[in-house]
Amino acid sequence: MRNLEKIFNPRSLAIIGASAEKKSVGWGLVKNAIEGKNLRKIFCVNPYRKKVLGIKCYSKITDVGEKVDLVIIAVKAKIVPQIVKECCQKGVGGMVIISAGFAETGREGKLLQERISQMAKKAKIPLVGPNCLGVIRPSIKLNASFTPATPKAGEIAFVSQSGALLDSIIDKALLENYGFSNLISYGNEANISLSEFLLWLKKDKETKAIALYLEGLKDGKRFMKVAKEVSKIKPIVALKAGKSQAGAKAVSSHTAALAGSHQVYSAAFLQSGVIEVKTIEELLDVAKVISWKPKCKNGIGIITNGGGCGVLMADYCAELGINLPKLNQKTIKRLEKSQILHQATRKRNPLDILGDALPERYKIGLEALLEQKNINGLIVIQTLQIMTEPEKNAKIIIEAQKKWPEKPIICALLGGKFSQAGFKLIEKNKIPNYSDLKRAALAMKTLIYEK
């Protein structure tokens, strides 16, 4: 495996194609690079400008009199080979080629891509792209991309063949509680392969789980070998595009990848320990839960203050093969002794503590269910009534998780405006919350391992 340190932890950064034109790619790259100006040196390369956003411009990368760890290239495709040649002469640490117009466009583009790939290979300089968005590492304020913003730091590494999809994920993350250790758009995969990124992430201390969006693989056997190795240490969840005939054709013109049979990919994921999902929402949901919660045996408890929601959750669990153990006599007696639970409480799993439940009822229910040995995890449902206290309920759930850390708790605290404080507190303490019951059930299913 090659050393990718200069790409993901550069001390200096150069933008070739830096632009003063607002909203252009070159302008966005410089704007984002400036976020980390206190942590690394920034150089701009543009022969037609003296400065861009206050940063001095050089005519060529070889004119820069200092070492350059990472170069971001955003110029027309036909100019890229000359730029790469100069970067190789300079001896830069790594390159990210944003520019499109390569193998995804046909024969001429493919030849261009082969030229730059061979030059980078000969010079032993790792290259990301071409036809990509770039790379982002929020914890060190590295944004080597033209995304509109940088998401917060977290424990999920998001690796995507599509740059535009990554952009949308970042926008969503700014509103919802998703944090990332790394975001990598690898585009046409001309030099650094997906497998190499996985091996690097395996060693990355900030990464706890890996989310993949891919359209095709260039070396399926190597991917399977590497994914099997990495997934044992850091769980991998994948969304594969190009399932249909129409989708497969679109893949070829997007990143020049070979889509292949979806059944083959699904089998490969299964053999490699990769969790396959069907939607972007599932990709994010599953990535969050596997980065925050431990695996557990089958056997899950449900507690709810809404009977209908409890029934729906039981249906979803049955559909997904999640077992709901019956409450044993010890648990039932414990609930019966409580002076806080309503007399109408049905002592079963799902445990319905009724709509007027205050935090004390949640506490009794949570502790009783988690105390039962064959209940290995818990789904907590909260519907909003006039007496519901979301923030206090959240504190009780957090305390229960601290007491039983080996039993994952997943929440479906439903609602919106009046429940926000509870949502934020729960997720701040790394307990995932889902706004839909089935999403919560699917997240729990992901954590269950079979004997």
Image: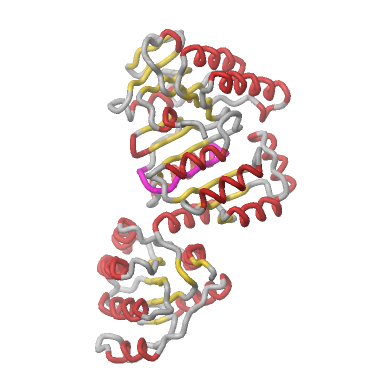
Is residue 162 shown in magenta?
yes
Magenta residues, start to end = 152-164
Tell me: 258 left or right of 190: right
Magenta region, mostly helix, strand or loop?
strand
| 296 in relation to 157, above or below | below
Front residue of this view, candidates 197 and 441: 197
Residue at 59% of width from left, 18% of height from top?
119
Q: Quadrant of residue 373?
A: bottom left
| 1 in relation to 332, above or below | above
Residue at 72% of width from left, 49% of height from top?
261
Where is residue 245? Give x, y as percent.
Answer: 74, 47
Residue at 65% of width from left, 54% of height from top?
266
Q: Quadrant of residue 277?
A: bottom right
| 303 in relation to 293, above or below | below
Q: Quadrant of residue 27?
A: top left
Front residue of this view, candidates 257 and 311: 257
Where is residue 366? Give x, y as percent.
Answer: 33, 76
Where is residue 251? Give x, y as percent.
Answer: 67, 39
Say if residue 74 shows up in the picture: yes
Tell me: 168 left or right of 224: left
